[in-house]
Amino acid sequence: MKFSNSLIYWYLQNDRDLPWRRTKNPYFIWLSEIMLQQTRVAQGMAYYLKFTDNFPTVFDLAKADESTVLKMWQGLGYYSRARNLHYSAKQIANELNGEFPTTYKEIIKLKGIGDYTASAIASICFNEPTAVVDGNVYRVLSRYFGIKTPINSSAGIKEFKTLAQTLIDEAQPGNHNQAIMDFGALHCKPQNPLCDTCPFADSCVALEKKLIKELPVKEKKIKVRNRYFNFLVIKTDDNKTILTERTGKGIWQGLYQFPLIESHKSINKNELITSEEFIKTFPKETTISLFNKKEIVHKLSHQHLYTQFWVVETKKSSEAKIEWIDIKKYPVPVLIANFLEEYQPKK
DNA sequence: CACACGTGGAG
DNA sequence: TCTCCAAGTGT
């Protein structure tokens, strides 16, 4: 209880004025929590404002097209968040009469909501004492208590959740949860934490044992896969193009792109136009030129995409149905959006 | 249950 | 340039 008191005391003095802190409307809290998953406040802010502005209620979100939702999410990454958000919005609007579930147990049943988000919403909106455990909480607790259990092991996940639950202030769980996360984000930072001015300096195990830089412990490193993308930027003489939707599993599900030929290495123009896939798609006479002189390397968390944009000029085609001017209506990955910025500079 | 899933900022 | 990582979840 002492721990929570100090935490909340710190929080009251260092509280950030964030838009989602001014409401307890579960719909708005939900939006903010989904957007901030694995995402910095600075990056998510504009999206929160855009979503609350365009979709002021869960009904507004529910009746939008998925493509519209993805377009508004464009650039924020982890697009399954947007798809699941939309899916759950429709469920709340249509099956739950627009009423957001009010307990952890019910909230966690929604798609896209896991232990963290259910705990956050239940505590902030409904005063249920369920402890959040996010990256900040792992860091604060592992340091303060000197816990070396890897935070991404199943043992660690259980251990930290249990510990966090014993520390929560049952009288004000929402404040407690936000306090420990803000403390981790602003004070007990990953690099260069502010131990000199830390209210817990006299009892922090990691500080005493000089383990600050070792904690928290995270095991395993991610593997990165190299892929080679050749986008075919079609331009017909009646100024139309082709976009294809990415379906199935993998990256950018539900987003659009130019027709893609993937190769196992970087290829030149001759290799491209003699490839089976190219011939199959473009039997007609075409003019083709490489747009980017230097290969573009787009880095995702698990993939490095070595990318070339090939501008393909052809005659009018029944395949090419999308007007150039309309491309901007489609949700596209940042990689494509960046290309369009350069290829079609804004006036 | 280990792994995939985006993007951008900091050091 | 490179590494880490930021309010995690689904499979």
Image (cartoon, coloured by chain):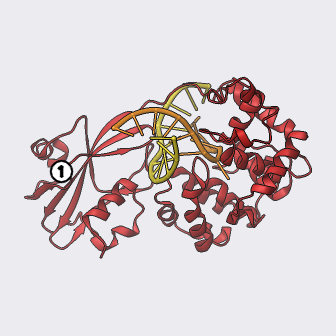
Chain colours: A red, B yellow, C orange
Residue at left offset 27%, top offset 53%: A259
Percent x, y of residue A212: 66, 30
Percent x, y of residue A242: 27, 62
Whether residue A288 is visible here, answered yes or no, is: yes
Up the image or down, A216 lies above or below A185; here it is: above
Q: Residues within 10 Å of mark 1 (few under 14, many from 20)?
A: few
The residue indicated by pointer 1 is: A293
Percent x, y of residue A179: 77, 50
> Which residue is at the front of the view, A181 or A221?
A181
Percent x, y of residue A342: 27, 63
Amino acid type of the residue tagged 1 in the rendering = Lys
Residue that extends furthest to the bottom in the rendered view of this protein = A347
Residue at left offset 83%, top offset 50%: A8
Up the image or down, A120 lies above or below A136; here it is: below
Residue at left offset 42%, top offset 43%: A300
Q: Is residue A99 left or right of residue A252?
A: right
Up the image or down, A51 lies above or below A209; here it is: below
